[in-house]
Amino acid sequence: MKHTVIGTAGHIDHGKTMLLKALTGIDADRLPEEKERGMTIDLGFVFLGNDVTIIDVPGHEKFIKNMLAGVSTIDLVILVIAADDGIMPQTREHFEIIKLLDIRHGIVVITKIDLVDREWLELVKEDTADFVKESFLENAPVVYVSSITGEGIPEFKNILEEMITQTPARQDKGVFRLWVDRVFVLKGIGTVTAGTVLSGILQPGAKLELLPQKKEVRVRKLQVHNEDVNECRIGERVAINLIGVEVDEIERGNLLAQPEYFEPTYIVNAKLYLLRDAKSLVSRTRVRFHIGSRELLARVVLLDKKSLDPGESTLVQFRLEEPVAVEIGDHYIIRSYSPAYTIGGGTLIEVHPKKLKYLPVEELEKLDKLEKADPEQVLLHHLANNPLELQTAGTAAREISLRREDVQNIIMKLIREKSVTVIKEKPVVSIVLTEHFENAQKKIINFLTQYHRKFPYRRGVKQSELKNKLFGKIDNSVYDAVLSQLIKKNKAAENKETIYLYNHRITFTPRQEEIKNKIEELYLKSKYVTPSSDEAADQFPEVKKQEILNILTGMVELGILTEIKTEVEKPALFHSKNVEEAEKILVDLLRKKGEIRLFEFREKINSTRKFATPLLIYFDRKGITERKGEIRTLKTA
């Protein structure tokens, strides 16, 4: 069943509240101060039958933020113009706000006709026609009423009821969401919040998340039109009795929503239209940002120009001074910081974007398409803007404000089309964009190609070094999947923690091979008192030192020599066969004695402290021995 929300709009003292009282018999002014001053200050609510809520908004310029909190949820507007005043400043501002919020259905009501003659009324009629020209109200019904005498009220009611039937129901995303516009305490009941259901269904006992506080609360009771109900739906005006939260923890502008669906954000990207009577807007201007029933301060960053002229539209990024939980497609209004007046508004097209200062034309075109993009395009754009970031249906749904089930269906379609690559299937399907996955593979291949050219005598690069240099904080599972695919396709290979091109081999010229054999013989004979790399180079004065160092590097990479690095000494070089022999000696010694000290091992291998120390450190790292002070024992049997 469709529930329609109607809102009033118009200048102060133009008879909005009196009109609703004449229509429904209910006085929308509920505050003592409002009755005392004869002026609407905050939102008022009246009902027309069971399926229509009418929100009465204040007309005074000081209470525009209260007016904005009410009209953000309406389906149909009643634009009220007093016959004795005609078009006034807040008539104009309210009407601009209504258009910026993309409200497309309405009726114009000329009130106080008992105070003017017919000639004057004709002038007001002409002014009104000019005022709404080329807007959604250009062909809307116009009725003339007196709330005092009752003239025109029956006609107004008939037209309004007809328009209600013609106003389409809003689309339901199936996820409960409600902007809080009232919060209060009732004796014996507790904390109560009120607002209009934007989507979804809510029942007593359900859990909700209060945002941006990210606090879990539970529903005790529900009331719609002042009656207890077992369920509330999209469009209904509902009072929610909450458990688990105190009244001072909630304020107007908070969001009540299905848990773990919305993620508060400090940055949003949006399409902005600047009103024709506003001043030019320069980038980084501080503004008042209104969305739903929330008002907060923000900086507006123009993404393609330094200033925006009146009557123009552009793509912008808002840097919010407080977090807010919003959806793609939400409408917003901006007002100047001081003095406060409405200057523009538009639609959110990204709710968790990266921080931007400027965008090239091609990126602006991509962003511009999002304003009316279908869900699949929105998801693809999100994946494209978060390269190699692991995404599930749940994480993506929170980021792009779609139902998890809808995102899941889109992901399955994209998997079939091979537009995305599955990284993990359990506990849930996790994906990245295939284009990014393949680009990551190309980056690795290009990096390894350059690396082998620069360091031909090295086997390859460590996985951790490759990851940090190319991808930074990439998810380990994504990185592992990229490497695994390269290895599976025989484009890359691994040896322990080293990655290299599949066809890369460390090769020596015949002359270098001859030198390599002499170096190997040198280290075999040196046993456990070996030359450093510089000392080894000195053994071949006829050969350039760098060439000897390259050959030594290649021998270490091929496993002929073992290089042991310590924090104190320079790296020590040993022939790998000698290192294996030293390990056997050490293990046999420990099995006999149970524990040893450095000097015992040093004497056993006929070495010095300088060389015995790095060998013991090497065996500690390998997990052969365990050190406790100066004593070492076998770590494993």
Image (cartoon, rainbow, N blue to C red):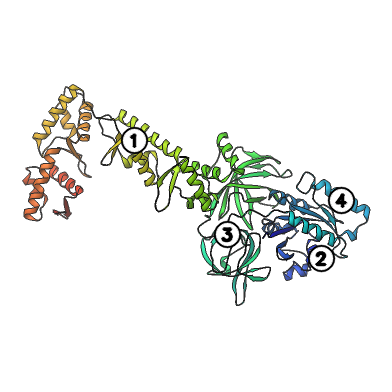
Foreground: disc 4 or disc 3? 3
Q: Which amino acid does label 2 sit on?
A: Ala
Label of residue 489 in the image: 1
The CA span between labels 1 and 3 is 47 Å
Residue carrying label 3: 176
Q: In this view, does 247 lie above or below 424?
A: below
The CA span between labels 2 and 1 is 78 Å
Q: Do the residues bearing badges 4 and 2 touch, measured as CB atoms within 8 Å?
A: no
475 or 337: nearer the viewer: 475
Q: Helix or strand or loop: what does disc 4 sit on? A: helix
Q: Which amino acid does label 1 sit on?
A: Lys
Label of residue 22 in the image: 2
**Earlier sequence position, callout 4 versus callout 2:** 2
Q: Quadrant of the C terminus?
A: bottom left
Q: Do the residues bearing badges 2 and 3 touch, measured as CB atoms within 8 Å?
A: no
- Where in the figure is residue 107, as x and y percent of width and height? 78, 54
Q: Is residue 207 left or right of residue 58?
A: left
